[in-house]
Image: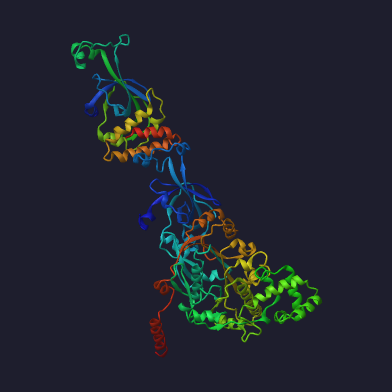
Amino acid sequence: MKDQNSEERTNLGVVVSGSLTRGVEVKLDASVLVEDMVVGRYIAIEGEKYRFFGMITDVSLETTDPRAAIMPPDVSDPFIAQVIAGTTTYGKLRVLPMLTIGGDAAGILEGPQPAKTVPAHFSGVKLASQRDVELVFGAEDERRFYVGTPLDMETKVCLDISEFVKRSNGVFGKSGTGKTFLTRLLLVGMLQKGAAASLVFDMHSEYGWEGKTEKGYKVKGLKQLFPSKVAIFTLDEESSRRRRVSTDVVVRIGYDEIEPEDVDLLRQTLNLTEASIQAVYQLAREFGDRKWLEAVLNLNDDDSKQLISKLNIHDSTYRNLRRGLDNLRRFSFLVSRAPDNSVRRILEYLDRGINVILEFGRFDDFAAYILVANLLSRRIYAKYRENAEREMGGEVAPAHPLVITIEEAHRFLNPEVSSRTIFGRIAREMRKYNVTLLVIDQRPSGIDSEVMSQLGTKITCLLDDERDIDSVLTGTAGKSELKSVLSKLETKQQALIFGHAVPMPVVIKTREYGTAESYKELGFLEAAEMKRKTEKDIEGLWA
Amino acid sequence: MKNQKLKMDMASKIAEVIEASSAEFTAQCYKLDQSPPLGSLVKTQDELGEIYGVVYNVETHSLDPGRRVIARGENLESNEDIFKVNPQLARLLSTDFKVMVVGHVQGKSLYHYLPPKPASIHSFVCTCRLEEVRAFTQSLDFLNLLVDVRLSVPVDEVTAACLRYASQAHSDPQGFLVKAGKELACLLGSDTRRLNSLLKRLK
């Protein structure tokens, strides 16, 4: 294998044809082994005026004579094999030019710009050098967070976190492709750069304290790495205690906090009919928004009969509704009246810039997740909205941006419910109120296309379902080219990032997470070190 | 002075031009059966400069077109005995070879295309020295003259013979053949069958 430096100098070939939309075609030189060219690698093309920066989106084999395919030459003869390589048979790359870097001083100052043209015929093509990649993705600084390296390169690819949190974002990928690891990294990035506070609805309790790799190794969660900046809230105190997680707040939700809209969202999960949902609204009108649920759950048979005849609800509808609502009784975090206002507690922490991770413990089913996530987010939304409006009136300072992380996002954002859930609204408009979403999903095709189109940056691990790939790439320039890149990602530690926070789509090998060294790089201090640092800080105070 | 140099170069003369056109010439060997090998590079020189060519056909025939050569060795032991017994034969027969022009030197520059004027009649023809072959085949532009020409003999045989011969003048014969092969592959890209058969002849 050649080393990186010698590869940088090698001319890969020349541009022979192409277009801006489809990408340019590059005929490979005979000396370049086609198998070394990997989809997703970066390419620099020296045009007359600009230097183009692009990505390999396809590799193909070509012959000058179609008959060569029917009567292949005798390649067992090394001489013949050597002669025909690169002449009658040759490799071809399709390169999508994405950025241009101007050749003159002004162009260099301006930095990379989106490519609006293609390099001239027979422009020389090389693998992008480390410097090119650095120029495009920038070095790690107070805004940029290092998320991984490009394929076969050592350079860092950095995500502009302050841009990232300005829009809602998505992390997609099949199960087991590293979504959780990637999300954990992004959360660390947001925390480290202080660009936004996070509220994570942690369905499987894997972000807060500790997670597990597929091989069974434990990896530290955010609380272990940044104890002073992360608070763990839990719905299931026992589960947290069993896992020896130091939780900050136990969340209890009162029946009085559940509104008809919350049940509406649970329609599919609780197997309720449309008529049952109508009945819920009727009941809420009857008993009042804050009392209806408890009242209905406490009704005995006789009272029920009276009630349904009064409200003209069909018997089977009522039975369907009761069956559904009885399901809620198994959630021990639901109490008739909550001792503490969970929303206020969460907001208190978020206001102080402390990230909140809500663990679901044993309640890791969709009903609980959808109910709680939606219910809490709705309240938080209201507060942020209020705050933003007061800010417009000049009363208060703008709120610290908030990023709400939700898993299994298609349950909240599918076309059927997305217009009704708070998450659909956040994805569409909450940017104005400083709240954005980080949606994590393995089935992006289930998400409303309107919501998908609003996502700023999409980070996607391997997807192989055609519909999922299509929905992730909707509205992206060079879609068909990226499609081939996306479906060829490796199942582990590789992801395609594109959108607002990166200048061009990029395939990365995700940054290491889980080793002692990686923790250190992320800013984690061992206990002894922490103590030393604190002592030093104290000394500094008195000096 | 110039004439003297011309004579020196001609020390290895083997034949004389007896028929010439822009693209080819015919030379008669001074000695029967002493023609340069098929595909070899020869040159002829006159006041205008040097003309390089590739030998593409060698023919031995009777000098008098009216007199056919007849078999004479029925009662003799060996081939050589025929000439011992019939010493006149060496004078009655002649070996000619046909040369395809592939380049020329004018002044001090070497050009891989046809000269402005054909070779002078009766000018001397000599085989090229190794360094001349090496210098001439540094560039393979002449191959396109060779592959496109229509000859009375199979042209690919001549091309292959020429490249095999020229490869011996290079320090890395195999490397030279690969380079030449690639040039041929570019020229014959759309005709894989012809290219394959030609490449097989290069070994």
Q: In the rendered view, would you say B189 is above or below A179?
A: above
Instruction: Classify residue A326 as left or right of residue A480.
Output: right
B169 or A291, nearer to the observer:
A291
User: Residue lying farthest front?
Assistant: A301
Instruction: Where is residue A426? Give x, y as percent.
Output: 63, 71
Q: In the rendered view, would you say B78 is above or below A364?
A: above
Instruction: Classify residue B5 as left or right of residue B178.
Output: left
Q: In the rendered view, would you say A348 is above or below B164?
A: below
Quarter location, residue A366: bottom right
User: Can residue A378 be seen here?
Assistant: no
Q: In the rendered view, would you say B10 is above or below A317?
A: above
How many marks are shown on the rendered structure?
Answer: 0
- The residue lying at 54 percent from left, 50 percent from top is A22
Instruction: Where is residue A310? Give x, y as percent.
Output: 81, 77
Quarter location, residue A368: bottom right
Quarter location, residue A329: bottom right
User: Can residue A302 be seen here?
Assistant: yes
Instruction: Where is residue A411? Give x, y as percent.
Output: 62, 67
B43 or B120, nearer to the observer:
B43
- The residue lying at 53 percent from left, 81 percent from top is A238
Instruction: Classify residue A330 as left or right of residue A44.
Output: right
Q: Quadrant of the N terminus of chain A?
A: bottom left
Q: Quadrant of the C terminus of chain A?
A: bottom left
A283 or B58, nearer to the observer:
A283
